Each structure stands twice: as structure tokens, then as C-alpha cells.
Image (cartoon, rainbow, N blue to C red):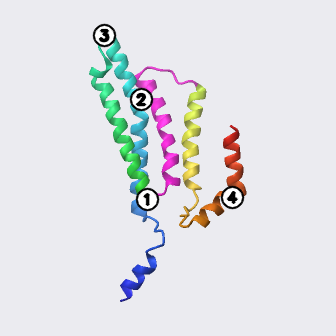
Amino acid sequence: MRMAVGAAAGEGAAQSPGPAAVSLGLSVAVVSSLVNGSTFVLQKKGIVRARGRGTSYLTDIVWWSGTIAMALGQIGNFLAYTAVPTVLVTPLGALGVPFGSILASYLLKEKLNILGKLGCLLSCAGSVVLIIHSPKSESVTTQAELEEKLTNPGSLFFHSFIMIF
């Protein structure tokens, strides 16, 4: 009887994932971000190789590996979003940009200038700061709660700012 009462009381409450689930979800998010960062580099490498051979890029295995990696990276990203709160997964998506930039400098022989390196560093630092200081996620369960959050002065300012720019 106690089990049934405890289960009924916890049905409406949002459960936070355990430490193992958070670690797994963040690991999947980092790996999928790195895979997503490599996809455009692989696709461009395939296009350059095909152009050099005088064939279509659709026949190049490197281009196809980039395309398949993109699909796998997005599936991993989706799985990460189901395992941990969005506020933890979203900043990790930015890690694909520095990874893709570094990979392009090696595979495509592109030069990364000082501003590009600084941008990569700031992207990584920003992701870490956002994850460390992420708020606890609150679930909105009723229409009244949603209306209250949308009429919050901070929310109104943000939406006005976005509409202007």
C-alpha cells in the first residue's frame, strides 16, 4: 500500500536525472558535437578530391562519410537531449565550431588566424561557463504558469529585443 501511495504522489513531479545519466548524456553531447563539427570539413574534403579527379562529389567516399557523420551526430544530439536537461546540452553544441576549425586547418590546409583562434577559445570557455552556472530547469505544467513566465519583465524585454533585431 505504501508503494502505491508513494508512486501516486510522485507521478506529477518532474524527476531530475541521476549522476550517471547526466554523465552519459553530457558525454554523448560532447561526442555528437565533435562529430557535427567534422562533417562540413569531411564534405568539403570530398568535394575538393572529386573536383581534382574530375568526377561528381556524390561518388566520393569522404563526402559520404561526412554526410553519414552528420546524421549520426544529430542522432547523438537528440539522444543527449532526452537524457539531460536542455540547458546542459545546448552550450555543448558550440564545441563543434572550434573542432571543425582546427580540423579544417589540418585536413584542408586552411590557416586559422589569431581572431579565429581567439573565437575558438571563447567558444569553449563560454560553453564551460554556461554549463557550470546553469540554472535548475523548471517545468511548466499549467497554462497559468506559462502566461506568468511569458509576462515576466525579463521575458518581455528579451522578446522585444529579438523583434527589433
Return the disc, 4 or 2, that comes first in the chain's sequence. Answer: 2
| Residue behind mark 1 | 22
Return the disc, 1 or 3, that comes first in the chain's sequence. Answer: 1
Q: Which residue is farthest bottom?
A: 1
Amino acid type of the residue that numbered disc 1 sits on in the rendered structure: Val
Above or below for 132 versus 94? below
Q: Which mark is residue 50?
A: none
**Local crowd size for mark 4, using a 10 Å CA cut-off: few (<14), some (14–19), many (≥20):** few
| Residue behind mark 3 | 54
| Residue behind mark 2 | 40
Rendered image quadrant of residue 32: top left
Tell me residue 143's x, y (percent).
58, 64
- Circles 1 and 4 in contact, beta carbons < 8 Å: no
- In depth, the one of 12 and 80 nearer the eye is 12
- Circles 4 and 2 in contact, beta carbons < 8 Å: no
Return the disc, 1 or 2, that comes first in the chain's sequence. Answer: 1
Amino acid type of the residue that numbered disc 2 sits on in the rendered structure: Phe
In three-dimensional space, the C-alpha distance between marks 1 and 3, rounded to whole angstroms, equals 48 Å
The N terminus is located in which quarter? Answer: bottom left
Q: What residue appears at the point 55 percent right and 64 percent down from the top-left corner? A: 140
- In depth, the one of 114 and 158 nearer the eye is 158
Amino acid type of the residue that numbered disc 3 sits on in the rendered structure: Gly
In three-dimensional space, the C-alpha distance between marks 4 and 2, rounded to whole angstroms, equals 40 Å
| Residue behind mark 4 | 151
Tell me residue 149's x, y (percent).
64, 60
